[in-house]
Amino acid sequence: MSERNNFEHRVSELIEESIAAKQSLLRSTAVISTVAEVSHILIDGLEEGKKALLFGNGGSAADAQHIAAELVGRFAFDRPPLPALALSVNSSCVTAIGNDYGFDQIFSRQIEALGHAGDTAIGISTSGNSANVLNGLLVAKKMGLRTVALAGRTGGELKNVVDYCICVPSDETPRIQECHILIGHIISELVERKIFNEARHISRS
């Protein structure tokens, strides 16, 4: 088999693996009910004038930024912005805290500064064991924020400290991340449609 054909075969395999991960997600009543509940608590907070604080490392930081952008910008239709912050984007803040206090404090310190009771803290970690995400959620819970984790199959340490843990039924980091952004899109749609009373079918260019 030529290298080109090898690549094409692997491309097909990876698409199938991604589909299989999402089918497992669809079959998980726990995931579906938790995603629905998280959407409700986020809606309640945003309607009360509260905000969402999202954070993670690497690809999970990118997911946090992506979801925050959907809320602040728009997901499917024009409407007023919703308050959401991704805590990895201020490089000066992240590096100052990391240098002066330690990398495990980069999110908790920001939550202390920016969080208020009733806000929603959403920590993203495929393993569920990232120390800085765990610390951020522990501080958030102590301050009276609603706490949510997006993790992999076991939920890791995060599962034991948050109000809601969305555990993707996979052990493969790329597949978990693909499901995390799907979940982020679902939550963004549900939040947007409910708050702005939009019932039409989603069509997005």
Image (cartoon, rainbow, N blue to C red):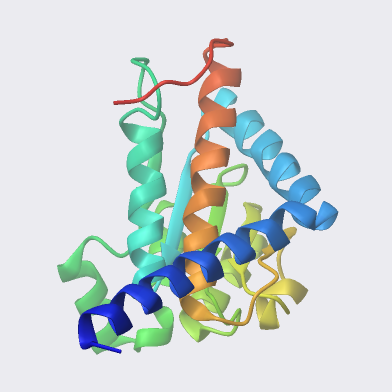
Residue at 62%, 58% (x, y): give it. Answer: 22
Residue at the far left: name it. Answer: 92
Which residue is drawn at the image coordinates 52% and 50% (left, top)? 182
Residue 73: tell me if it is visible.
yes
Residue 97 or residue 175, whichever sits in front: 175
198 or 99, which is in the foreground? 198
Q: What is the residue that sits farthest to the right in this orientation?
A: 29
On the image, which quarter does residue 62 sit in? bottom left
Query: How many numbered callouts?
Result: 0
Question: In the image, residue 193 lies at what x, y percent?
Answer: 55, 20
Q: Quadrant of the N terminus?
A: bottom left
| Residue at 36 percent of width and 66 percent of height | 61
List x then y, in percent, for residue 94. Answer: 26, 73
Q: On screen, 146 above or below 169?
A: above
Residue 162 at x, y = what percent?
71, 65
Query: Can residue 124 be seen from the camera position used here?
Result: no
Q: Quadrant of the C terminus?
A: top left
Task: Give the answer, above or below, for where 11 lies relative to 44.
Answer: below
145 vs 162, nearest the viewer: 162
Residue plotted at (34% across, 86% down) = 101
Q: Is residue 117 left or right of residue 84?
A: right
Drawn side of residue 61 relative to residue 144, left or right: left
